[in-house]
Image (cartoon, rainbow, N blue to C red):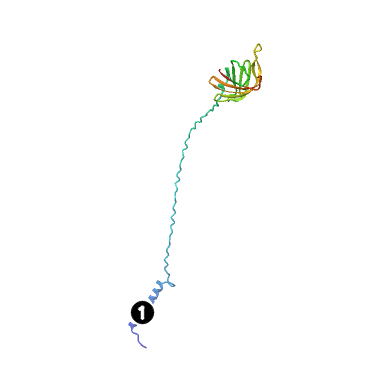
Amino acid sequence: MTAVHPATWFERRHVVVLFLLTVILAACGSPSGPSPSTTSTTTSTSTSSTSTSTSTSSTSTSTSSTTTSSTSTTTTTTPTVTEFYGTYNITFTKVSDSGCDYPIAPSGQLKLSGNPDGSGFMADVLDRGSVREYRGGTMNIDGTFTGKGSGLAIGFTGGTAGAKPEHEFVGTIDGTVTGNAVTAFERMTLTVGCAVNPQSVVLELKGTK
């Protein structure tokens, strides 16, 4: 049997102890199992920037201007022709006579009447107690007038009998009133009373009221 040198044994024991310590330290410092892989987790924080758009509503205050409307009432006055109406004292003048030798008086009257607007116009010629009537005409705003007539026309027999209606006529009257004066024309066709019928006679009537 080979004798072991004390120093050599001690050295061997020391090596074994170091080995065991190394194993123990390795076992304690390094856990069993796979080495964890270091995962670098990058957390991307997405910051949602909420842009709050504050819309400032500009309130436009409309100031209502109260306008006081002055209502002007215009009264329209319809022109009237009443100023032309009335009774005119006239003289007769024979303008023409186609062959009847119609007698005329030196003077008489002309009466004009009707509605304010000129409708319903009437002209009455007073001649020696007889009246020649003209109707169906118009008095105009400028003072002119027209009318139509028919009936008896005064004549003159002379002697004690005096004037009497011995003629019949159809005809027209037309004229103009200016201020207080009138000028008119009777245009008559005598159908009875002349030596030969019919005959035409035109008389001018002038006067004032």
Look at the picture and state if 65 lies above or below 162.
Answer: below
> Does the rendering let one see residue 126?
yes
Q: Left or right: where does residue 31 sit relative to residue 104?
A: left
**At 34% from the left edge and 83% from the top edge, which residue is drawn?**
8
Q: Residues within 10 Å of mark 1 (few under 14, many from 20)?
A: few
Occupied quadrant, residue 45: bottom left
Q: Quadrant of the C terminus?
A: top right
**At 38% from the left edge and 75% from the top edge, which residue is drawn?**
22
In front here: 199 or 174?
199
> Does the rendering let one see residue 150?
no
In front here: 57 or 110?
110
The x, y position of residue 19, in whole percent, is: 38, 77
Occupied quadrant, residue 4: bottom left
Residue sticking out furthest to the top: 160
Count of numbered circles on the image: 1
Q: Left or right: where does residue 175 sit relative to residue 165?
A: left
What type is the residue that disc 1 sits on? Val
Q: Quadrant of the N terminus?
A: bottom left
Occupied quadrant, residue 108: top right
In front here: 115 or 145?
145
Look at the picture and state if 164 lies above or below 30.
Answer: above
Look at the picture and state if 47 lies above or below 89.
Answer: below
SS at mark 1 in the image: helix
Residue sticking out furthest to the bottom: 1
Look at the picture and state if 138 lies above or below 127.
Answer: below
In front here: 38 or 14?
38
**At 34% from the left edge and 80% from the top edge, which residue is drawn?**
11
The x, y position of residue 91, in whole percent, is: 57, 17
The x, y position of residue 187, in whole percent, is: 60, 22
Return the residue at label 1. 15
